[in-house]
């Protein structure tokens, strides 16, 4: 093992730990109570410093932990090396092939986990298809992201989800902060770091105005950009308009944009009709989970060739002479070209994951197979720990006020 790589990764994990007071509070209790003692936990998440610390917290709870990366390009090799040196079974490397990516997840599943954490649904999908034979001990698990929640809900509707899964992505302390503030900041951190371009004065097109899109648009506006939002949902479109953004179809916005950022969770959000009318030099980035939101087949079909012009930037030379620039191979730009969400944001999300793991293990029999929300009390526990860490105190309702709010008279 490369000791320099391990030491570099340890420094990154330690930096994350120092700025995650909520997860530290959870860890302190876990170390004392060992709520996951004797259990095997399987994880498929973006393997960077904050994720590594979550894995260590679950190990401190008594679990044997195995982890794979949830994206071929988001693993940080120094962090993976340091995590492995700490005793966690790590199956990941940056730049793995699709075959290696699947193999690594299968290696995690071969530990026959009792509990799982997934990001995007690939691990759970394998447990219901090619790896059904490895699902016998699974009590349940948690899903981290919007794309994975959509897949789980589809499985639940079809009656095939074989164990309880909690939608951590849908918890208030996840989507209000992680999806909005985390995605908003980390997406622009990565785009600016990779392109070295100015955002002020540029025209930015945000495709999709869910919680991630809201954060991306808000941060672009704060950087001085002119922001256009495109949507398929009429209610979200009105919201974007009232938030002060131009709203139009993507076909109308395509010739105007200089930066395009997708955050839809759907395939083909940017496709051939849009690519055909984009201006020369347009920059394309994806902030959704999979590399299908910007149609790479359509981009290739319109091109005579491509070249890597900077790390993380592919220049596509179109038949008509225009050039379009794709960031991060169309994968999650904030993790492929950056460090992902800020530490303080992931402190909330991963504290939810840790507490949800404990909850699933305690209640899996009563929950039963299917998709379940994170209980409100876990959400509030994480929020209160966060406020306490910042020295913030809240008011409390008096008994008279509580009675008033319960009354209908």
Image (spheres, rainbow, N blue to C red):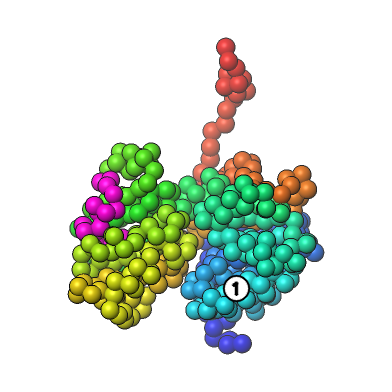
48 to the left or right of 377: left
Q: Position of residue 115 (x, y in %)?
A: 71, 60
369 to the left or right of 305: right
Quadrant, the C terminus: top right
Quadrant for residue 34, please give it: bottom right
Residue ID at (48%, 61%): 289
Residue furthest bottom as drawn: 2
- In this view, 390 is above or below 315: above
Residue ID at (42%, 48%): 210
Q: Where is residue 232 in the image (x, y as percent from the top left)?
A: 37, 46
* Residue 129 lies in the magenta-colored region: no
Residue ID at (61%, 87%): 1
Judging by the rendered image, the residue that carries numbered circle 1 is 102
- Asked whether residue 5 is in view, the answer is yes
Mark 1 neighbour density, 10 Å: few (under 14) some (14–19) many (20 or more): some
Q: What residue range appears in magenta?
A: 245-260
Label count reads 1
């Amino acid at each position: 093992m490369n000791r320099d790589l391990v030491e570099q990764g340890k420094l990154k994990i330690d930096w994350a730990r120092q700025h995650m007071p909520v997860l530290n509070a959870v860890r302190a209790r876990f170390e004392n109570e060992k709520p996951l003692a004797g259990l095997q936990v399987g994880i498929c998440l973006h393997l960077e410093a904050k994720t590594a610390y979550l894995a260590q917290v679950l190990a401190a709870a008594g679990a044997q932990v195995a982890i794979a990366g949830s994206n071929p390009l988001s693993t940080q090799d120094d962090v993976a090396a340091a995590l492995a040196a700490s005793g966690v079974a790590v199956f990941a490397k940056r730049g793995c092939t699709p075959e290696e990516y699947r193999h690594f997840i299968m290696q995690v599943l071969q530990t026959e986990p009792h509990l799982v954490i997934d990001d995007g649904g690939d691990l759970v999908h394998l447990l219901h298809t090619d790896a059904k034979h490895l699902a016998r001990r699974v009590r349940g698990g948690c899903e981290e992201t919007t794309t994975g929640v959509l897949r789980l809900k589809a499985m639940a509707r079809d009656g095939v989800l074989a164990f309880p899964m909690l939608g951590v992505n849908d918890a208030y302390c996840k989507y209000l902060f992680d999806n909005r503030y985390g995605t908003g900041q980390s997406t622009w951190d990565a785009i600016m770091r990779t392109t070295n371009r100015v955002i002020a004065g540029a025209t930015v097109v945000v495709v999709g105005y869910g919680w991630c899109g809201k954060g991306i648009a808000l941060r672009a506006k704060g950087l001085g950009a002119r922001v256009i939002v495109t949507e398929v949902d009429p209610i979200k479109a009105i919201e974007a308009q009232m938030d002060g953004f131009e709203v139009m179809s993507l076909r109308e916005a395509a010739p105007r944009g200089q930066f395009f950022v997708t955050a839809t969770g759907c395939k083909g959000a940017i496709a051939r009709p849009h690519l055909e009318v984009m201006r020369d030099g347009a920059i394309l980035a994806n902030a959704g989970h999979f590399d299908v939101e910007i149609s790479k087949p359509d981009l290739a079909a319109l091109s005579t060739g491509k070249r890597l012009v900077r790390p993380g930037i592919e220049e596509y030379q179109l038949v008509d002479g225009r050039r379009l620039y794709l960031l991060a191979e169309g994968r999650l730009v904030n993790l492929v070209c950056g460090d992902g969400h800020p530490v303080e944001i992931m402190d909330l999300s991963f504290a939810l994951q840790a507490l949800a793991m404990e909850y699933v293990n305690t209640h899996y029999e009563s929950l039963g197979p299917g998709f379940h929300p994170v209980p409100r009390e876990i959400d509030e526990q994480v929020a209160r720990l966060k406020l306490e860490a910042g020295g913030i105190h809240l008011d409390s309702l008096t008994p008279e006020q509580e009675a008033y709010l319960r009354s209908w008279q």
